[in-house]
Amino acid sequence: MEATLASPDFSKRIPQLDGLRGLAIGMVIYFHYITTTFGSSRSLVARLLTRSASLGWTGVDLFFVLSGFLIGGILMDARGSANYFRVFYSRRACRIFPVYFTFVALTLLGAALLRWPMFAPSIPWPFQASFTQNLWMAAHNTLGSRALWPTWSLAVEEQFYLLLPLLVYAVKPSRLPWIAGAGIAGAAVIRLGLLLIRPNLVIAAYTLLPCRMNALLMGTLAAWFIRQPRLWQKLLSKRNDLRRALLILLGCLPLFLAIPAIDSRFEILVGLNAFPVYYALLLVASLADERIGRILRVRWLMNLGGIAYFVYLVHYPMFGLLIHAMGVRTAAGGIVAAIIALPLTIVVAQVSWKWFEKPFIRLGHKVHYSGRRKSEFQRIAHVATPEPAVAE
């Protein structure tokens, strides 16, 4: 019989969440590297590898679920703070802006100096600077240059960060799950309506916040759920059922592998609803089930998760630059480029984390949450305002 797990301590970093983040970035890397290397090949091995990687794009949904969970939880715990908005936004700026704007500036410089295909078509810099590139992508029905492809999801998250603090602050905690549930259902309805009205606008269904808010709100709903002591104890008593549910849902993967295209109606109408649910269940299970948590606490996976932000931005441009510099024309050359690109990206990411990102994070944490009263979430769940917060 498994020992009863205490409620997660949200004032400390939760290691298995780093493991989930490492899993998410690993899926995205595998998707980009394999589909780019073997996408045009007709051999059986190439087709099998491409098919195996075809769902790696759902790693972005796992990132969204994690963001909703971590950021939503921080906001719930800090809801009663007098400087609630100031601390949240200053910490987000210190975490996101330095790496992002450095990356965008270097990419725009590369586009100006080099005429490589990966830099075209270029997204106008005002959209990149204001985290609204997903609006440009939706309007033009293209993801823009390959070098900046990953940034659409950052735009979605930044737009979500503008709205969620207002929602958590203004709405009674008991009503939050109902509103989150409405948003989750609303995203499915919006995607359906969009495809019925303009079936060719698949990029809009893939990159706009109203179409993707379900994954972020699933994470927020999970954060609310595990902060309810009664529900947490109920979950612990149903761990075996949770494991079985995860295995049953995992058994449905062949259905999605049979229709692997990101822009297929099946993936937009079914996959974008199903995968956030699965990843939210996996996240909750990682906290409630020690067996799952132990798997996600593998050191290399946690280390990859710790540098996932930089790796997410840089892994694809790094791969593209190597392909161009090496003059790759074959799948074998693509494999060599990938073998070089991955460790090179990780090394640069580790340097960035230690010497560039962490100092800015420390700067953000010089401002602490302070309040006249505890938030309702804190009174119910008996948790402290997170210092440092697990997401930051």
Image: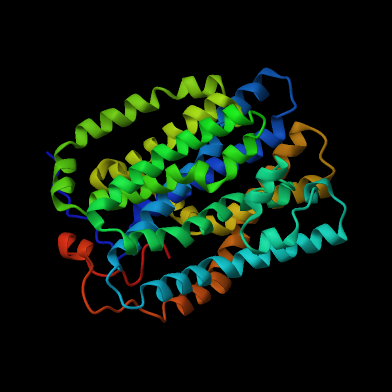
221 in relation to 363, above or below: above
Image quarter where the C terminus lies is bottom left
Q: Residue at x 71, y 62 (%)?
A: 126
334 in relation to 124, above or below: above
Q: Residue at x 30, y 74 (%)?
A: 81
Which x, y percent locates residue 147? 72, 51
Q: Is 205 placed left or right of 125 in the picture?
A: left
**In the rendered image, which quarter is residue 292 located in?**
top left
Viewer can see residue 315: no
Asked which colour scheme the image uses, the reply is rainbow
337 or 368: nearer the eye? 368
Image quarter where the N terminus lies is top left
**In the rendered image, which quarter is residue 131 located in?**
bottom right
31 or 108: nearer the eye? 108
Which x, y percent locates residue 121? 79, 48
Q: Residue at x 46, y 51 (%)?
A: 300
365 or 194: nearer the eye? 194
Which x, y percent locates residue 250? 39, 27
Viewer can see residue 265: yes
Instruction: Identify the residue at the far front of this view.
Output: 197
Q: Is 105 placed left or right of 8 in the picture?
A: right
287 in relation to 247, above or below: below
Q: Is 323 placed left or right of 258 in the picture?
A: right
184 or 56: nearer the eye? 184
Q: How many marks?
A: 0
Which x, y percent locates residue 277? 38, 37
Q: Residue at x 27, y 78 (%)?
A: 371
